[in-house]
Each structure stands twice: as structure tokens, then as C-alpha cells.
Image (cartoon, grey):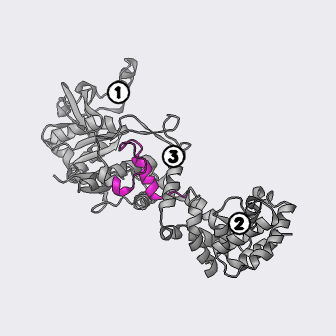
Amino acid sequence: MTVITRFAPSPTGFLHIGGARTALFNWLYARRLGGKYLLRIEDTDRARSTTEAIDAILDGLSWLGLDWDDDVVFQFSRAARHAEIANRLLSEGKAYHCYASPEELTAMRERARAEGKPMRYDGTWRDRDPGDAPAGVKPVVRLKAPQIGETMVPDLVLGDVTVQNAQLDDMILLRSDGTPVYMLSVVVDDHDMAVTHVIRGGDHHTNTFRQVQIYDAMGWKRPAFAHIPLIHGADGAKLSKRHGALGVDAYRDMGFLPESLRNYLLRLGWSHGDEEIIPTAKAREWFDLEHVQKSPARFDFAKLTSLNAHYLREASDESLLPLVLPALEKAADGPLPDVAAERIKRGLNGVKQRARTVLELTGGLAFYVAAVAPVDDKARAILTPEARATLGRLIPTIGAVSEWTEANVEAAVKAFAETAGVKLGAIAQPLRVALTGSTISPGVFEVLAILGREESLARLHSNAS
């Protein structure tokens, strides 16, 4: 059997973090088992589905590296097929026309509320003579669901889960205008797409009992179901924007790498021993459903940021350059001069060791581009009159370095400190501020070497006395 999974988002907004994790789990499961991972856009809510949302979903999945197999399926385009199945059930006596009026349904709802019970259709038209149908009323089509016994669904995460059929009513398949409902469309699409494993969020679990009744009525083989835990905030509350319930595009804009987000989402509800750093190649090798946890996972923005810092350090300079250059060029109002571009290439490795996001990496490289490094307020306090005077005395010493290399300028500065009888730290920090405008940077001797003699001396002159 070829394993086939699917991700089926509704295009009513961005690709949120929970949906991204669902897509990841489906993608990993299919890839590990050599199967297929399909994408279906459930755009049946025509009032809320937008082209912009579809584009955002496709863009987000592509950025995350979750490539899908075959063409994207759009659910709305298959409405005729969905209605065909409802009508087949109708012709086989497994569904029926229901003419219940809005007033009758309201009465059922109020009666259930008074009895403290959930609203269920009472089956008034289930076995009633169609000849009793009121004139001019367009009926809905309802599934003739089992009324006794129970429905059991084996779940690859939750185990066997059972519900009494008396708790389920005859669900609507076609509305009075002939359009299919979501619950029917999902089942027909999953069957026609030959989906073998439905891996989705736990919030869909109650839908499963109704959906398997359609499979059973049609005589179709049920797929395997796996309902993964929801994501909560670090405080245990339902995930919201304040916790990080944002679109995938927002994480990209905040400077997170797709590989770090994949790793973090993987660990939200799944584990492989004590492993925290799980590159995608390993995830494709290890992922299973047996180790998906049952309880909700907690989103921790600090852990994601820490993980992103790791992936930044591990990333090649060549892969990071395209991420930082556009922002640096925008700040410079145009393409970087060759000398600045070369400094960025040489300095990227040193800066990425301390950066946690691409935004921090870009900001940390900015001093290599600036004509004069602006000194921030915190750093300005380092440049005391005494420090400026020390820099002034240092300039002739390093200016005399014959071959401008990191080792040579380091030796010159250390020799100056020894001759002047001052600690190296008392020189290094003012030197760092004068060169970069900040108290935090790569090694100061690395910075001197990358800036070059002319630029380094110019910055020192502007900050010395």
C-alpha cells in the first residue's frame, strides 16, 4: 500500500502556526514511508475564501520546504461530484429528504436546551411519507445514520475512541439549494484522492464520527485517522496572537529560518528521545505517529528563538547572504559598493555567531556598510575623554602596521597596551565602539582586518581626541 496523506487548509486567512505543523506532520509521514503528500484547498466557504489567502498558504508551504505531490485540488470545483454521492445515497435509501421548517428546527433546539441536551435533529422526516411534503419547500438531504449501537474509530494517536450512535443525529449532506456541506465534501475528496492517512488537529476529532458514517454508508474503506494535539501558549491557555499564533509569513518577516521553524514545530507534540536539534533529514528518517503525544503542546517563543540562533550559526554564509543583502541595500538606498559587499561577505561569519534572527544578523552587519558607524547611546558612554585620548595615541601605532592583517593589528594593539601600561580591555572596548558604534560585535581585531586600514583609521580619527 502506498501511503497518501493530505493537508487541507481553508483559504480564509494566513497559514497559521497550527496549520503549518499539521502540514509538516503529513509531509514527514509521507516522505518517511515513500508515499505521497497531497494539498487540497477547501474553498467551499465562498464568502470568506480569497485569492490572497490561497497565495499566502502556497507561499508559506513553499517557504517551509513542504513540497506537495500532484496538482493542488480545489474543493469547490468538485461540488458536482460531492452532490452525486449524496444523491446516490438518496437513491439507495441511505439518505432522505427532510422538509423540516426553520420553526420546527427552532422548536427542537429550544426543547433540547430546556432539557440540557445538545441540539440534535429528531428524525421527523426519516421514515415519513414524501407525499406529506409541504408544497413549495425545498428539502435538505440528510444521511440516514445508525440509531443504535456505537461507532468506534481507531486513532493512531488517541487509541480506540467510541461514541454511542444515539448521540449522533442524521447530518445534512446537501443544503436546500443543492450545495454539499463540508462534512460530505471532505469524505468524498479523501476517498477520491485515495488518502490512506488523515492526520489533522485534535479539533477535528468530533467530526470523524460523522464522517466515518458516510464511508460506511458508501461501502468505502476508511482511512486511518490520527488526531494530533492542539498547541497552547506557554501559560497553558489556548494559543492566541500574544503567544505566537501568527502566520508563517510573520515568522519569516521576524527573521526566522524555515529549517528552525520546521525543527521547532516538529517538537511541538512529537519527540525522539531527548533530541532537541533535529535537522530535516533526520526528521524524515525518524518521524512516526507512535511518538505523537496526546496532551496539548506549549508554544515557547524563547525556545524557538534559541533554536533559530543555532541554525543561523550552522548555516553557510552563502545561504545567508541573500537574506541580508536586500535589507542592507534598502538601508543604503541602492546597491552596495563593491568594498561594502566584500566586507559583508567576510564579516558575516563573525556576526552570525551572536545573532538570533536574520533581523539581528542584518543589524549586526550594518556597521560594515555605513560610511561612518553611528554610535548608539549605550556605547557612547564608553567613549570617555580618557578613552578618546587613548584612541588618539593608538592611531600612530596601528597606522604603522606594514601588512594589514588580523594577526598584525592584534599584535600592534597588544604592544601598545603593554607600552602604555594599560589593560587590553581598557583599549579594546573603546576601540570596538569607535569602529562599530556598538559595545557588541565580532572580535575587534577581526573587525579591523575586514574594515581595512583606511576605513579603520578614518573611524578612529572621528572618535579620538
> What residue is disc 2 on?
436
Query: For residue 198: magenta?
Result: no
* Residue 139 seen in this snapshot: no
* Residue 198 seen in this snapshot: yes
Residue 455 position in % (x across, y down): 72, 77
Q: Which residues are magenta?
A: 254-282
Please state which amino acid type lies under the numbered disc 3.
Lys
Please state which amino acid type lies under the numbered disc 1.
Met
Mark 2–mark 1 CB contact (< 8 Å) = no
**Quadrant location of residue 201?**
top left
Q: Badge 3, how many Cα within 10 Å: few under 14, some, many 20+?
A: few
- Residue at the far top in the pictured view: 115
Q: In the drawing, does residue 293 fall left or right of residue 82?
A: right
> What residue is disc 1 on?
119
Which residue is depicted at the point 25% across and 28% down?
A: 162
Q: Earlier in the sequence, mark 2 or mark 1?
A: 1
The disc placed on residue 303 is 3
- Identify the secondary structure beneath mark 2: helix
Mark 3–mark 2 CB contact (< 8 Å) = no
Q: Badge 2, how many Cα within 10 Å: few under 14, some, many 20+?
A: many
Please state which amino acid type lies under the numbered disc 2.
Thr
Q: Mark 2 vs mark 1: give the one in front.
A: 2
Q: Mark 3 vs mark 1: give the one in front.
A: 3
Mark 3–mark 1 CB contact (< 8 Å) = no
Measured in 3D between alpha carbons, the distance from the residue under mark 3 to the one under mark 1, in whole angstroms, is 43 Å
Residue 389 position in % (x across, y down): 85, 66
Q: Mark 3 vs mark 2: give the one in front.
A: 2
Residue 404 position in % (x across, y down): 67, 78
Q: In the drawing, does residue 146 fall left or right of residue 335?
A: left
